[in-house]
Image (spheres, helix red, strand yellow):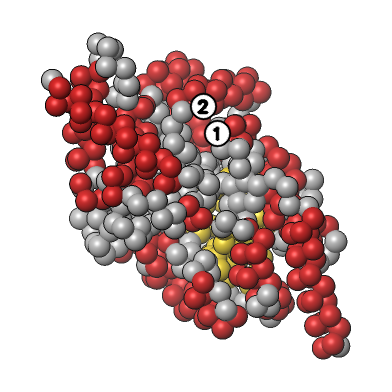
Amino acid sequence: MNNDNNHNKMNRRHFLKVAGGTALASSTLLAACNNKDDNNSVAISEADVPKDKMTYRVNPNNGDRVSLLGYGMMRLPVEGGTTMRENPDAPLDQELINKEVDFAIEHGVNYFDTSPAYCQGKSETATGIALHRHPRDKYFIATKLSNFAPETRSFEESKKMFYNSLKELQVDYIDYMLLHSVGGGEDAIAEFNERFMDNGLLDWLVEQKAAGKIRNLGFSYHGDIAVFDNLLQWHDQDYYHWDFVQIELNYLDWKHAKEINEENTNAEYLYAELKKRGIPAVIMEPLLGGRLANMPDAIVADMKRRDPDSSVASWAFRYAGTPDGVLTVLSGMTWMDHLMENIKTYSPLKPVTQEEDAFLEKIADKIVDLQTIPCNDCNYCMPCPYGLNIPAIFVHYNKCIKEGNLVRDEKDSAYKQARKAFLVGYDYSVPKLRQANHCIGCGKCRSHCPQRIDIPKEMEKIDQFVEKLKLSDKKD
């Protein structure tokens, strides 16, 4: 019996390696939440949020009744009323986290998604503290095997990570366990093999599922489409059974992901592949890191004319929740107002109609034309070994595009005003020692980016733009 098991394990590992040498042609990527300064909020109070109207989806594998809104625990608030991006050294605000989790559960949210990598390694601890105060049958916990760093990829170190997750979350089992960020890295197949196959880790996780330590086993997809396709072939051929898969889905990425970055894959394809196999989809990035909530005034005006009483964000959440193969939609909700608004959007869900779908497709076309950098502010690229605040640089650059402060022609009448707005805002948003001109092009960040952004190239572009603005400023 043991010999047969070992033989099966070797076949499974060999399968991906063979596929890695033959079927690897196209590559992709996708990736996490809300921003406090979005321009589309609708005034809402606790009294406006219903407690008994949450939309639920049933997991066909085991009958789990899962809230359509999932709580992403990757953008937790820190003490002082700020975020970790703004104040990375501040401790998490556990009191506020407890309050928000209590409110979420009271209003029907029962899916909480975390990772050993979130919030500089603090998310699982904070999540465990907040949830442990509630009966275990009131919530589902999702966490991940986030063994990105080479020193964590051995079988023993990865096992330690799994057992530490149980400890920090204060649970005896994980409801939804994910292989984290599958398909990432410069050589996605080699990295997947090193993280999960060569060390026997995936087979061990299957054993933990059989032992009851894991109830559902899946993966989050952030990369090479060949890895995604091969893992689904495993499902088809009974090498491994995937209980769920986490993908990026929103109305921009549905048809435009590959147009924005040729290494990406459209969500339309990813969802269809899961749907035809009956694999429930967990959705990340419904707002693309807040970009689909904090949009140019002209686009906001279009949406408000269509539905004056709905926020821009609610359009994105309704879109992500409409497909019937979606089990839950994750949102990294830092602040109570976002939590309340998202709960209201899904209490109950008002599915997107065909006419609204066509409207959102036109909105997506306009967003593509903006040519912003597709950064989701997920912070996977951080910390930079040379001190750059990469997400903050991209956030400021994109914000200036949105607000019309990226005028490049010195003859343009708005050039001086736009130049001043960009430079002043840049120094305010990003300390001088953490700006783009300090990038040496080492490329260590590139392989960690879920959106496959060529970060050094973008840093060089932004630095050149800034230098041009400073030179023209001196001429005046």
Q: CA distance from mark 1 to mark 2?
A: 7 Å
Q: Which residue is mark 1?
A: 260
- The reply to whether callout 1 and callout 2 are in contact (CB within 8 Å) is yes
- Residue 343, x across and y down, in percent: 46, 44
Q: In what element is the residue under mark 1?
A: helix
* Residue 189 in view: yes
Q: Residue at x 32, y 25 (%)?
A: 406
Q: Residue at x 40, y 28 (%)?
A: 295
Q: Residue at x 80, y 83 (%)?
A: 6
Is the residue marked by circle 1 packed among few (<14), some (14-19), or many (20+) residues within 10 Å?
many
Q: Nearer the viewer, residue 454 or 417?
A: 454
Q: In what element is the residue under mark 2?
A: helix
Q: Amino acid at mark 1?
A: Ile
Quarter of the view holding residue 301: top left
- Residue 265, x across and y down, in percent: 64, 41
**On screen, 71 above or below 410?**
below
Tell which residue pokes out farthest to the bottom in this image: 2
Q: Which residue is mark 2?
A: 368
- Residue 291, x across and y down, in percent: 43, 36
* Residue 321 in view: no
- Residue 14, x across and y down, in percent: 79, 70
* Image quarter in which the N terminus is found: bottom right
